[in-house]
Amino acid sequence: MKQYKFILSTLFLFLYTINFSFAQNQENYTVEGIVKDENGISLPGVNIYDRETRKGVKTDFNGKFKIQLERGTTLVFSFIGMKTQRIEVDAFDTSLHNLEVTLKEDLELLDEIVVVGYGSQNASDLTGAVSQLKESDDVVRQYQSVDGLLQGRMAGVQVTSNIGQPGGGISVKIRGVNSLRGNNEPLYIVDGIVISSAGEDTNSAFSDGNEDQGVHNGLAGINPRDIESIEVLKDASATAIYGSRGANGVVLITTKKGSKGAAKINAFVSTEVATISKKIDVLDAPAYAQMTNEVAILKGLQPKFHLEGGNIYPIENGNINPSPLTQVNWQDEIYQPGVSTMAQLSASGGSDKTKYYISGGFNDLNGIVENSNMKSGDLRMNLQSNLTDKLKVDARMSAFYSQGQFAQSGSKGGSSRSFTKSVVNFQPIYENDASISDIGLSSPLSFIQDYEDLTNELKILASLNATYSFNKYFKYQVRAGTSYRSKDRSIWYGKDTQKGSQTNGALGISGLNRYSYTIDNLLMFNKKFNKKHRVDAVVGFVVDGITSTQSNSESENFPVHSLKARAPHLGQTIVRPYTELTSTEQLLSGLGRVTYTYDNRYTVTATMRADGSSKFKEKNQFGYFPSAAAAWHISEETFLKASDIVSNLKLRGSWGLTGNQGITPYQTFNNYGIVYYTDYNNNILIGAGPNNIANPHLKWETTQQTNVGLDFGFLGGKIYGSIDAYYKTTDDLLQQIQIPPSTGFTAYLTNRGSIENKGIDLMLETVAYAKKDWTITVGGNISFVRTKVLDLGIPEAPVYINGQEQMASYYLGNNISSGTYFKQPANIFMKGQAVGAFWGYKTNGIYQSDEAAANGPTVNGNTPQAGDIAFVDQNGDGNIDTNDMTIIGNPNPTFTFGFNTKITYKNLTVSALFTGAYGNDIVNGNLLIETDAYQTNKNVRPEAYYNAWRPGDTNATSPRLGHNDPTVFTDRIVEDGSYVRLSNLTIGYDVPLKSGSIERMNIFFAGRNLFTLTNYSGYDPELTTFMGDGSIMGVDWNSFPNARSFSLGLNVTF
């Protein structure tokens, strides 16, 4: 951390010195005037700012303004629905005391440059579905990573994240699920260079795979305050130019550049406090002791506790110990406020020929658990230079380094391996300082004091782009870029944890080293003919390569535990020696795109990309991905051009093919791996064995998508938005098909089956009020999507759906847990049904009497009794078994939405963002334990005890006390996952300043995840578990709680 502080301090001193030297030679003067439209009507609320310093004002109710400037700059006038105008001003121009500016109506509304694949276009020429985000710095600066910017702000983009743990995993999906293998993350491109996906991480640290859920945020390292714009490409017309990597959508991130003028320095600092957003209601200590006694008596055991005067005394060998036990609420004890600090310093400026942007940031982030924290530093340098009149160079480099400690989260193991389970279910008393309960449940404190998950990560991203202009129309561009990522992760379980107690300490170490390169060669053409014809074209050749190395080692039996994860050499038992697995993949591509516009009314676009992948054999090595699109600018027709109501109306349509090569390399070959086994003397021996059955016929998944869209704007841009309807199918799905165990394997990777997605994306923004000192904007987006399995390419079998037998092909997802509870799949992938539907038992309450139980079906041949769960006999054979399992829920939301509003009054700005989802179900697997009042020494939810069936009850809603472990998956743990959340509330104030070196000072207060309206009883309806496993969807198992945060920050521009 000392290094970070030294670097930032040095950078600040250097940049401030530069700025001070410029300031000495600048003089201030005043510009005033009025802004009108083409009809001579004054315009209130027009944004006017100095292009160099960004200092600005707004016109008053009468359209008048007054602003102080420095000598020789450019004033920018912008207003929604009007074309932005730039006017160069000079201190010696006397007309500046009565400046009259006329803004012209922007009939296309989108008269700005939008970044698209391998280039940029005027937004008016777009024929595909592209969403653009250019948030103000006031919004951007409070977020720790890019996912916060995407959430709730774009139609068709679903972001799932958790701010309770710094650096925690995220998930981003664009227009639903496109693949059944879990590779549904979009392609991320930063300044033209492909980076690793949000879900890519190190392999599991332990050979049992139980830590697979604990993934981290792969997008960490991109500082949101360095971002200039984000474009999300959604339909095939926009993504086909990325070919085999565009099926899941594309996220283009462009970082900031400098501009001509004196050095502009920006300093930012904020402090954030995060607290747990919701706690699970469980029994307090006296109620727990009472339940434990009652269950013990039902099992023929002696009571464990004596309750008197609010105290709890242990009963030992039939005698009451006079020393009361300490009562504790574990959630209050463990989840504590986390205080974080974020800081950044940046500088930008330049001359006519060279411009620069430099920034450095430092984050000290702390989660809501003591051992959850991350410290990181980042540097960025962007330089653009016109070497000659024809040759331009753009060089960009960024570096990121982090050290993190993560709380245990998301283990696939049973309750004994889970930190979040122990906080809820561990006995709410201190009893003999037990770190492990009688049933093997680890104490919450053991996961704080004797557990470590340490990471070190380095990321470097660099690119050099040279553009040579042959003339005004032709130019050649070559870009060479590289990215490097190195990450080490060590997970330690000490002897006070259940896992570590069995092995005298356990340590798993994993590593990831990923290097990639990109070389683009592009020839570009842009020309307007005879005032009505415009052609924009690009053709190119691209080479991409990735080399990735995963490493693992695992050891147990540590004679010294004090060093924890920092002493791997002390492990006496080598469970898995250090191994490395290196893979290399390459992509060779040719691409082309042509856009033709006639008279600003009709636009057509054609795209083609050919990809050759090293992942496939020669016969299937190349894939071809075409697209075609057209747009009709209806508002440019004579019958609408003069309309005072319709200012923009554009109809779009597109079709195209994209692909997915989301498999690891070498799957078309027989792979061999290391096999560990022990001899008769327990010595570890190392051998080699086959890992897979080669399939030389593997090929791309292919997604075909049709999109129809309408862009609209009314009342001079006060109301604008878009609506898109799409239909897409993905064929030749890459799937692991189950095969007979006699082959020596359980599954075989092949291309079979197809799924469909269809939906509607709607975005609407309005300027609700704009007069004098007030501006109010309101907007939102909503996305409807339906995903269904069309075919799986496997034989059909009889199933029961809603009591009716039918034939269908299907397969089940992976088991949720490796422990006692939920050691079974939750999801089914069935022809004709929603992707990942829940597959379990339907129930009909609790048997309230022995007579009712006797009249019900047997359960695996056993007669139920009063207080047992009443299962629904789907096939009517009088017995409950696996043949009675059926669809009991759907993890896919009917729609997701975001709603935003921004209110500006003079120097005060208030903005709010609401997000949510509706119609999805969640399997709350934690309820299997939290509502199981069967065992002693385990806490439960109040309803499991107070609503448990007892003799004479007729309205009980929970099983009887001592009921045998209800470990089967039923609709009793399927809950409504719909929610509405106030995701962000920001209040900012621009401090009035007199002329001087400080151009702007903004103080802001922000809150995130302030409240959530939901019927879901778990920690949070946004699930971040199983994000890397496409066969498990909508299941909450050991989820880490989310947080509510408040931050106070300062942003100063010099």
Image (spheres, rainbow, N blue to C red):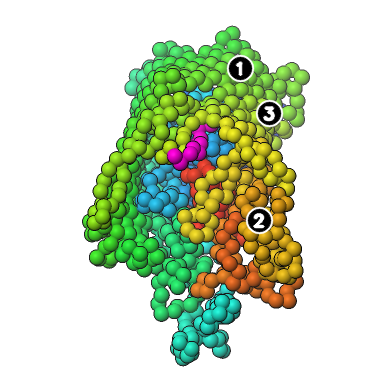
Q: Is residue 490 visible?
A: no
Q: Is residue 609 left or right of residue 885?
A: left
Q: Is 597 colored magenta in this rendering? A: no
Q: Is residue 890 visible?
A: yes
- Give the residue drawn at x 63%, y 54%: 881
Where is residue 105, by image quadrant?
top right
Among numbered discs 2 and 1, the one appearing first in the sequence = 1
| Pick the front one: 983 or 906 | 983
Say if mark 3 contacts mark 2, CB within 8 Å: no
From the image, which quarter does the C terminus lie in?
Answer: top left
- Give the residue drawn at x 73%, y 76%: 952
Where is residue 289, by image quadrant?
bottom right
**Amino acid found under the numbered disc labelled 2:** Ile
| Pick the front one: 845 or 212 | 845
- Give the residue drawn at x 64%, y 14%: 599
Among numbered discs 3 and 2, the one appearing first in the sequence = 3
Residue with the mark numbered 2: 880
Q: CA distance from mark 2 to mark 1?
A: 60 Å
Residue with the mark numbered 1: 604
Among numbered discs 1 and 3, the one appearing first in the sequence = 1
Q: Residues within 10 Å of mark 2 (few under 14, many from 20)?
A: many
Q: Residues within 10 Å of mark 1 (few under 14, many from 20)?
A: many
On the image, the x and y values in percent for residue 777 come to 65, 44
Q: CA distance from mark 1 to mark 3?
A: 15 Å
**Amino acid found under the numbered disc labelled 3:** Leu
Residue range highlighted in magenta = 733-742
